[in-house]
Image: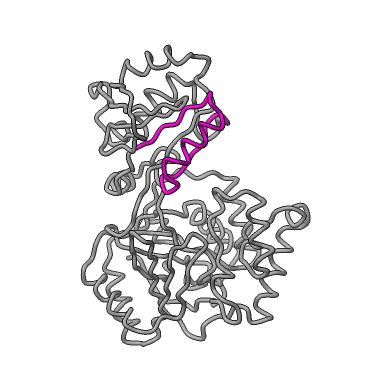
């Protein structure tokens, strides 16, 4: 059983929510982060992403002091009783609505909450140190679940109430939060949510690995461990599968690996049909790829299906372009460590690929058809991991809108 429960969320109180929430810093420069610091003194980035002098000093001490200052000044305040939080994210083209809750770390250990990414010890330890430092999880684990009409309809019904927060975020997405305080609503939501068989992690694999590390450390230190302590739980932001959106995750390679254009195209044609395109190429189906180099767009179509193994990972487009182009032709052996490769989420549009290549004419970019969410589920259910940088879920839940303090 998932053991999904309400919790006492710590939320913005004497400060506007939009001044506290932290954007994803995956594509933010240090200058951009500092700009957010200067505009919003109380922003959670001061805890999550210390930079400049703060990073050079005792970053954990600075972060803890900032969090304590937020609480002492009632910038944030913990709810008096456990609640659920209905959470809607809306853009001009997309709406997703789900709920914030906590669930037991045992549900992750027992594979009821399924991941699909490989995690790395250094990043896991950094997040564990960060959470242990303030005994708090600032950002939720973004999960999705297979569509459940009864649960989704009930969640929608709860949005009839007046929202507690509604604001435009840094990326112009609208975020709305409803606090579910009524006991009968809480009981029904608990019942419906715990009928879900599995949750699938969309974003937050290193966070949940860090929470597991904290749980193992804390439980081994506590001779009177009961299983109900706050560190046994983690905060989730759960959305239906059909509302969770995956963008393409595109690649830019710094150079052609000593090849000239003619040689490179010749190598490409061994496994791909290759034709010039007068328009930028956003693939319309699997096995199609866009390629941009020296001001020219090309449409690539993989033509050697017989070379693929009969397993889900081999047949993923992300592995096809990696295995039959990036590794064999361009010499990218490990996308995680090679400094010749950069990744650009499809939410930034094809303009971003063109700009990156135009800034460095030796480089080449590839646009890729978005990974299917059913493929992510299949990989998770057979306990495998997706290729690196193969999914970009967007929009993402914000960090700092509701936080989970382990001491409830």
Relative depth, front residue between 374 and 222: 374
Q: Which residue does the image show at 39% across and 45% down from the upper left? A: 391
Q: How many marks?
A: 0
- State the image coordinates of residue 115 (x, y, percent, origin top left): 39, 50
Residue 265 drawn above or below residue 284: above
- State the image coordinates of residue 339 (x, y, percent, origin top left): 58, 31
- Find out whether residue 366 is within the magenta segment: yes
- Left or right of 136? Residue 183 is left
- Left or right of 216? Residue 382 is left
Most distant residue in the left direction: 149
Most distant residue in the front direction: 278
Q: Which residue does the image show at 36% across and 19% down from the upper left? A: 268
Q: Which residue does the image show at 30% across and 62% down from the upper left? A: 240
Among the 4 quarters of the image, the one containing residue 300: top left
- State the image coordinates of residue 282 (x, y, percent, origin top left): 33, 38
Query: What quarter of the picture does the C terminus occupy?
Result: bottom right
Among the 4 quarters of the image, the one containing residue 152: bottom left
Residue 88 drawn above or below residue 307: below
- Left or right of 15? Residue 306 is left
- Find out whether residue 243 is within the magenta segment: no
The coloring applied to the image is: one colour
For the record, the magenta segment spans 339-368
- State the image coordinates of residue 46 (x, y, percent, origin top left): 66, 62
Relative depth, front residue between 380 and 220: 380
Query: What quarter of the picture does the N terminus occupy?
Result: bottom left
Relative depth, front residue between 41 and 305: 41
Among the 4 quarters of the image, the one containing residue 329: top left
Relative depth, front residue between 75 and 101: 75
- Left or right of 309? Residue 45 is right
């Amino acid at each position: 059983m998932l053991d999904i429960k309400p919790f006492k969320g710590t939320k913005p109180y004497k400060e506007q929510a939009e001044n506290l929430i932290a954007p994803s810093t995956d594509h933010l420069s240090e200058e951009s982060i500092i700009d957010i610091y200067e505009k919003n003194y109380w922003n959670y980035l001061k805890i999550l992403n210390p930079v400049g002098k703060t990073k050079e000093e005792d970053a954990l001490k600075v972060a803890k002091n900032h969090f304590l200052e937020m609480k002492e000044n009632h910038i944030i305040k913990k709810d008096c009783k456990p609640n659920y939080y209905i959470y809607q994210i809306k853009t001009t083209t997309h709406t997703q609505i789900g709920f914030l809750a906590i669930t037991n770390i045992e549900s992750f250990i027992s594979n009821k909450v399924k991941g699909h990414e490989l995690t790395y010890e250094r990043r896991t330890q950094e997040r564990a140190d960060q959470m242990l430092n303030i005994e708090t999880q600032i950002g939720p684990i973004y999960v999705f679940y297979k569509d459940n009409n009864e649960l989704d309809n009930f969640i929608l019904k709860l949005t009839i109430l007046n929202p507690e927060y509604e604001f435009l975020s840094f990326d112009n997405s609208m975020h709305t939060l409803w606090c579910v305080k009524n006991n009968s609503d809480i009981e029904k939501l608990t019942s419906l949510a715990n009928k879900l068989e599995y949750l699938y992690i969309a974003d937050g694999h290193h966070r949940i690995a860090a929470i597991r590390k904290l749980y193992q450390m804390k439980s081994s230190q506590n001779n009177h461990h009961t299983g109900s302590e706050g560190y046994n739980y983690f905060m989730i932001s759960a959305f239906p599968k059909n509302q969770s959106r995956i963008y393409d995750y595109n690649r830019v390679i710094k150079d052609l690996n000593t090849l000239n254009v003619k040689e490179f195209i010749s190598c490409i044609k061994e496994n791909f049909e290759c034709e010039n395109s007068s328009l930028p190429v956003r693939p319309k189906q699997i096995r199609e790829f866009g390629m941009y180099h020296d001001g020219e767009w090309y449409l690539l179509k993989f033509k050697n299906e017989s070379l693929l193994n009969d397993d889900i990972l081999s047949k993923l487009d992300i592995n096809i372009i990696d295995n039959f182009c990036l590794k064999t032709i361009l010499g990218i052996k490990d996308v995680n460590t090679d400094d010749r490769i950069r990744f650009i989420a499809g939410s930034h549009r094809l303009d971003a690929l063109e700009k990156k290549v135009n800034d460095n004419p030796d480089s080449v970019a590839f646009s890729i058809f978005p990974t299917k969410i059913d493929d992510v589920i299949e990989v998770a259910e057979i306990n495998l991991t997706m290729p690196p940088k193969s999914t970009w879920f967007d929009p993402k839940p914000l960090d700092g809108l509701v936080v989970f303090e382990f001491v409830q």
